[in-house]
Image (tube, coloured by chain):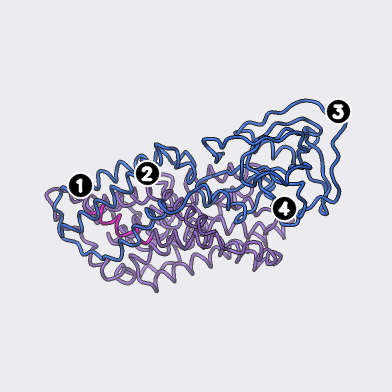
Chain colours: A purple, B blue
Amino acid sequence: MFDVFFMVFLSMFLEGLPFLIIGSLFSSFILVYVSEERLLKSIPHNRFLGVLSACFIGFVFPVCECAIVPVFSRLVKKGLPLYIAVTILVSAPLINPIVLLSTYYAFTQTLGYVYLRFIMGFLVAYSIGLLVPSSLKRGDVLLPKAHAAKAYNCCCESRFTDFLNHAVNEFFGITRFFILGSMSASFFQVVFPRHLLMGLVGSWFLSISFMMVFTYLTSVCSEVDAFIARSFMGQFTPGAIISFLTFGPMIDLRNTFLHLNYFRRKYVLALVFLIAASNFLVGFSVNCLLWIGGVYL
Amino acid sequence: MKSTRILNACLMFSYASIVVYMLYTGRINYYLHSRFNPFLYLAAFLLFVFSVFTLSYNAPDKESVRWHYAILLLPLASLFFFSPESAQNNLAAVRGIQVSSSQALFEDGLELTQSPMMPSVESVGGVINVSDDGFRDFVDGIYAEYYRFSNKRVRISGILYKVASGDDNQAVLARPYIWCCLADARLVGVLVYSHNLSSLTEFNWYEVNGVVILGETPSGSIPLIYVQNITAIETPHVKYINP
């Protein structure tokens, strides 16, 4: 079992490595080349419209949950309103063409799950965007060291060398957290007593909770989690499967470690709770709606 | 801090070298689906650029924490100390073996209630050669549309797993699949039945020639291959199948 643990860890690390580098480059690009004024000008002033447009950013910027965290933290440091940045954080890894396609392949025979994943994912992302208080400032959520590093001061010979220098620093900053997250996730992947918990699946409450805990702890990539979710069809309620599909890309154990590198613990806990509560509600609503409508997926 | 820069550059160079080595030797397929290969080439290239940049450019000092390097070295250490081959053998114990897209597992204790009978020679017809790529379609097919495969001869290869059924005459012939990375790897297989399975070595590769029939278990009928001939084969170059 020990060797499986390390192999799973290594596969998660190798899978995420390119996206960590891409995320670091994007983050550094935003720091060096995008001014705060330009960033703030690019978002609609109306909060409802701003959150709505942020929900679909994944279609132009289809990033996975590993790459989004450094980008998200950089956007916050740059002064993007937190509610917009959080909407991008939760929507981009879920509402994007790659995830759409993989979900379609996984649920070809039950397309209801594909529609529900994206409709419910959108509703959750939009609601979370509206729920984040607009009064919350970056200083309230960022760790002091991260907050102090928000401003860009040219320290190298040129902007390009600055860009590379920051990308390397960003890469080292997040990789160690990513490694810790991958190790924890592979631990739960290998030792999680999945079969023992199958007895919990009868109740709506427990089945949704179990699926959410499972996706959080195992931290499977959003590109492929639909294939895992499919393996639970027939054993868990449709609402539990939808919660699995919407919750995992928004936050997982591996990402929580990455968040802790930039943000205050209190804020990270609040974010995890908010995302979890919204997704639980989604799963419960799906079960209620299907039960009332007498629909079987 | 020159030593920190050298350490960082060496680390990134090692990551890049390992990625290139794994891509070159094909060992990467033990860990990841092949669609990630272009991303890994890009990652290796960027890591080389980063390491050259870090060495050549005298960047402003950055506070470094030594114990972080212990964490950063973990992926390299695990590559040297653990073999993907042994992980593959233990995958069945960790994940179980799935039968088709219905995703049911061969649970411990799955036992045939009566010994299956080889169908009469006259009733056996047609030969199906199952390729690597066709393995899952075949396994899916015999569960979803058994009537299409009933009493057909089949030639199929895979890894032999002895299910804990207490019956030495039954085993599972399975292939490992990776949809994305090893974290979502699954073994997909088909039950095989023969009177001489106990002498075979678990986790080795075998080619089975047999006939598709139905066996009876306490939970109902299950398609299986009644083995006519089973031979050990060499381990193929690519063991995991990327659907």
Q: Residues within 10 Å of mark 3 (few under 14, many from 20)?
A: few
Q: Are marks 3 and 1 in contact (CB under 8 Å)?
A: no
Q: Which mark is residue B121?
A: 3
Residue A82 picture location, percent across and down: 36, 63
Frontmost of labels 1 and 4 is 1
Question: Disc 3 versus disc 4: distance between alpha carbons?
Answer: 44 Å
Tell me the amino acid under the disc marked 3: Val
Toward the viewer: B228 or B108? B228
Query: Which stretch is magenta?
Result: A166-177
Q: Position of residue A77 (x, y in %)?
A: 28, 62
Which is closer to the viewer, label 3 or label 4? 3
Residue type, numbered disc 1: Phe
- Measuring 38% from the left and 52% from the top, which residue is drawn there? A67
Q: Are marks 3 and 4 on the same chain?
A: no
Question: What chain letter is assigned to the residue under label 1?
Answer: B
Counting residues from the N terminus, which is met first, the one under dot 3 or under dot 1? 1
Residue A118 shows in the view = no
Examine the rendering and report whether any part of residue B61 can be seen. Answer: yes
How far apart are labels 3 and 2 at the CA level? Answer: 53 Å
Q: Which residue is mark 4?
A: A296
Query: What's the residue type where badge 2 is placed?
Result: Val
Residue hosting label 1: B53
Q: Is label 4 on the same chain as label 2?
A: no
